[in-house]
Image: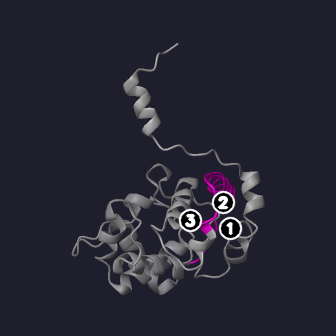
Amino acid sequence: MMRITGALLAIALALPAHAAGDPAAGEQKSQVCAACHGPGGQSVNPIWPHLAGQHAEYTTKQLQDFKAGKRKNEQMSPMAAPLSDQDIADLAAYFASRKAPSGTATPELVELGERLYRAGNPDTGLPACMACHGPNGAGNPAAQYPRVAGQHAAYAAAQLRAFKSEDRANDQNSVMRAIAARMTNKEIEAVADYMQGLH
């Protein structure tokens, strides 16, 4: 049996503890979420995001940030305030277990949106979206980069504009703020629309 030294124990105690999520419990707790995010996390209103198929790690961070005031929204901040760590873990596990939505892109925006998503804009130093969110928009759970494929274009564009204006500032190391700052409104619209149709 391995002995835990004082240094290892100190490191272990310093790491954040995350509750294991229970999707069945999360389904019960998600009933109130359905009013905006739809049954099973598939929102019918394009200003509210789909949660179905989103990585538990990302959903957990967002709910924790709403609760802590690191991310602000007049609807979500009060909804997250009473949630316990277990509630958050359960909800995140439930939505991660649901089938991710798919959407369609506007034909006239596809060419620009795809070029930005896959290659960025070398003229302005804009990196390719797929570098973090993957070629198919599935994201990266370990890095807490969200799934963007199938997300409502209106919601994705609103978030990019919020990062650009720095109204939203809960991105790690200011990565999304730095990226969105390099984007024109036309580029934001095109890439958000392209991601909606990505699958």
Q: Which-is-in-front pick, marks 3 and 1?
A: 1
Q: Camera-side residue: 96 or 22?
A: 22
Q: Which-is-in-front pick, marks 3 and 2?
A: 2
Assign a secondary structure to mark 3: loop
Residue 193: percent from left, percent from top: 49, 79
**Farthest-out residue, top:** 1
Q: Are marks 2 and 1 in contact (CB under 8 Å)?
A: yes
Which residue corresponds to mark 2?
A: 95
Query: Is residue 102 highlighted in magenta?
Result: yes
Assign a secondary structure to mark 1: helix
User: Label 3, label 2: how many angstroms apart (C-alpha)?
Assistant: 18 Å
Q: Amino acid at mark 3?
A: His
Q: Amino acid at mark 2?
A: Phe
Residue at the image point whose x is 40% and y is 33% from the top: 11
Task: Write down the quadrant of residue 100 in the picture.
Answer: bottom right
Residue range highlighted in magenta: 80-104
* Numbered circles on residues, count: 3
Where is 45 relative to 171, above or below? below
User: Label 2, label 1: how many angstroms apart (C-alpha)?
Assistant: 6 Å
Query: Looking at the image, can residue 111 be seen?
Result: no
Residue at the image point whose x is 37% and y is 86% from the top: 186
Q: Which mark is residue 41?
A: 1
Q: Is the residue marked by circle 2 packed among few (<14), some (14-19), or many (20+) residues within 10 Å?
A: many
